[in-house]
Image (tube, rainbow, N blue to C red):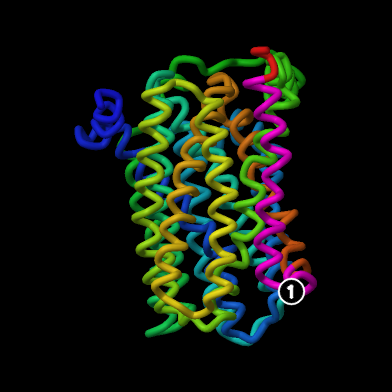
Amino acid sequence: MRHFMGVLAVFLYFKPKVLVIVMLGVASGLPLSLSASTLSAMLMDTGIGIAKIAIFGLASTPYAFKYLWSPLVDNLSLPILSKVLGRRTAWLLLTQILLFFTITFVGFYAAQAPNLFILGAGVFCIAFLSATQDIIIDAYRIEILTDEEQGSGAAAVTFGYRIGMLISSAGSLFIAEYLNWAIAYSSVALFLIPGALAALAYGEPSLLRRSRKVYSNFIAWLRHSFADPFIEFIKQRNWFVIICLVLLYKLSDAYIGMLTTPFLMDIGFSRVEIASIIKLYGFLTTIVGMFIGGYLIAKYQNMGFILVLGLILQCVSNLVFVVQASYGNDPSVLIAVISVENFCSGLSNASLVAYISTVVKKEFAATHYAILSSLAVVGRTVISSSAGFVVSILGWINFFYFSALLSLPAFICLYYLYYRKNK
């Protein structure tokens, strides 16, 4: 109980830096649905088929490759802005301004019988800017928190992230139902503003203020920015297995993510029902899972146990959709299914964020976190693009069985990291 209250105290005492993390988490969570589930609903409304909708998942590939430009964000100062605001804050402000206008453009363009290539390019830009924003926010969070606060910080950023996803998913669906998609997207973009204001108010992380390095030449800067982060990371024991685990851990959950909304629309649920049950009610069960995940991390300090538990729950959460597919358009069944699915997702997400935060080095926080977190979304972006074709071959029920089996490789990685070495 003492550990549980310790986790809750982070929120109850309203520490300024934790509130900043929550608000930045909101900004981080906003764009994801706009290039995933909310985008799928909008494309369904325009009459695009499920197979093509799944292919749109490829437009989100920047999330999977953000480590390629993370060293620039980690080390490059922006002219004028960085001198005034600091490096992290300057990058954050610029990225959010560009993200605001890109989201607004996609919303208005999609409402006008769009060319799919241009629309895909717009979604790609949202994903690229969102991935860049994530690089900055993840580094900012790691740098302003102590090592002891990283578990609570993971819960805080996940909490904010889910609020952002709620706004851009349920909020967008409600607005689109009663107004239109253009207003829905532009309204969501406005919620980027509080996170920017919070970062401006809190200022640059003290770690960066203390440790600004000066390099003798461009080659030295290049080596520190690109080579050193990778060299330092692979010095860790079992570094390759760590990479495999992060790559595979959310694969089964991510594989069905892009098609959850099309699945429910396909079996007869309305946008309002989806927004009310999946997005709004589902948000509450996700928060419960997130807090319990934070409690278990704080209480047991056993990351292997938490990761195994999260992986088991992910398998269960995929299989409950078999029940929904069997019952069809039944709101009471959907409430039960979403209770299980979102609780499991909240717990496993908090566990993965906490795990990644423990294996990065603060000196290279942006690059290390970008490498690992980008691997974590490969399933959602690259691999899940095949989900629509798998559905067309297997049907919905067999598709959900198949997605649960995708957790098996991650179990092997966890066994190697946490259990095999103890025998």
Q: Tell me how many marks there are.
A: 1
With respect to residue 321, does 223 lie above or below? above
Other residues around mark 1 within 10 Å, as few (<14) / some (14–19) / many (≥20): some
Residue 349 x %, y %:
50, 42
Please report the bounds of the magenta region as a residue range: 391-419
User: Looking at the figure, which quarter contains the C terminus?
Assistant: top right
Residue 47 x %, y %:
64, 86
Is residue 416 among the parts visible in the rendering? Answer: yes
Q: Amino acid at mark 1?
A: Ala
Q: Is residue 418 magenta?
A: yes
Residue tagged 1:
51
Please state which of residues 276 and 15 is positioned toward the viewer in this rendering.
Answer: 276
Occupied quadrant, residue 155? top left
With respect to residue 100, does 353 lie above or below? above
Give the residue displayed 39% in from the left and 69% down from the top: 277
Residue 140 x %, y %:
46, 32
Occupied quadrant, residue 396? bottom right
**Is 385 displayed left or right of 329 in the figure?**
right
User: Looking at the figure, which quarter contains the N terminus?
Assistant: top left
The kind of secondary structure the magenta stretch mainly shows is helix
**Is 181 displayed left or right of 229 in the figure?**
left
Give the residue displayed 49% in from the left and 56% down from the top: 341
Give the residue displayed 37% in from the left and 24% down from the top: 299
Is residue 217 among the parts visible in the rendering? Answer: no
Please state which of residues 362 and 88 is positioned toward the viewer in this rendering.
Answer: 362
**Is 199 displayed left or right of 40 in the figure?**
left
Q: Is residue 410 magenta?
A: yes
Q: Secondary structure at mark 1?
A: helix
Give the residue displayed 26% in from the left and 34% down from the top: 8
Question: What is the residue that sits farthest to the left in this orientation?
Answer: 13
Residue 283 x %, y %:
38, 57
